[in-house]
Every structure is written in C-alpha cells, then in structure tokens.
Image (cartoon, rainbow, N blue to C red):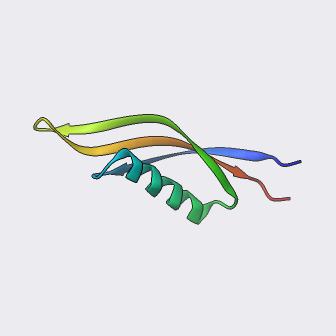
C-alpha cells in the first residue's frame, strides 16, 4: 500500500503553457521525492498591449510518501 500527498505549485513561461508545466514539474522534482503526476488546475495568460506576454499554470503535484 502507498500513500500520496498533493501540493500546489504555480509556474510561468514566456514561451507556452507546455513550457510552464515542464518548468513546474522539473522544479517540484528537485524538492519532492517520488513525484508521480500532475494535474493542471488552471491556466491563464498575461496580456500587454494586446499581446500574450506570459503563460501561467497552477498545478497540483502528486508525490508518494516514503515509509
């Protein structure tokens, strides 16, 4: 039997939502052990002068607790 925990993180990218997601997962993996998955909870963009300048994501990261 395993027990998991969920933590919420936010990340941004000037490139794309996918890039923001990859950055969030990579950063969470540096701190948390046994990262198993992520759920994209929210996506939004920052608009300046009619142009999308930043992609932001809120993720719930799931990681398995060690015995």
Residue at the bottom extreme of this rendering? 30
- Residue in the image at 36% along x and 49% along y: 12
Query: In this figure, what is the number of numbered marks?
Result: 0
* x and y percentages locating residue 8 in the rendered image: 55, 43
The residue that appears at 71% across and 46% down in the rendered structure is: 5
Residue at position x 89%, y 48% in the image: 1
Residue 52 as seen in the image, left or right of residue 44? left
The vertical placement of 9 against 45, above or below, is: below
56 to the left or right of 58 = left
Q: Residue at x 20, y 37 (%)?
A: 47
Side (left or right) of 20 relative to 31: left
Q: Is residue 10 above or below residue 45?
A: below
Q: Position of residue 48 (x, y in %)?
A: 15, 39
Query: What x and y, as percent, mark residue 42?
Result: 45, 34
- Residue most toward the left? 49
Q: Dividing the image into 4 quarters, which one contains the C terminus?
A: bottom right
Q: Nearer the viewer, residue 16 or 27?
A: 16
């Amino acid at each position: 039997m395993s027990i998991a925990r969920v933590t919420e993180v936010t990340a941004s990218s000037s490139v794309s939502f996918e890039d923001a997601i990859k950055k969030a997962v990579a950063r969470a993996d540096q701190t948390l052990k046994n990262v198993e998955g992520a759920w994209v909870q929210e996506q939004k963009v920052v608009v300046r002068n009619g142009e999308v300048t930043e992609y932001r994501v809120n993720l719930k990261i799931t990681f398995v607790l060690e015995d």
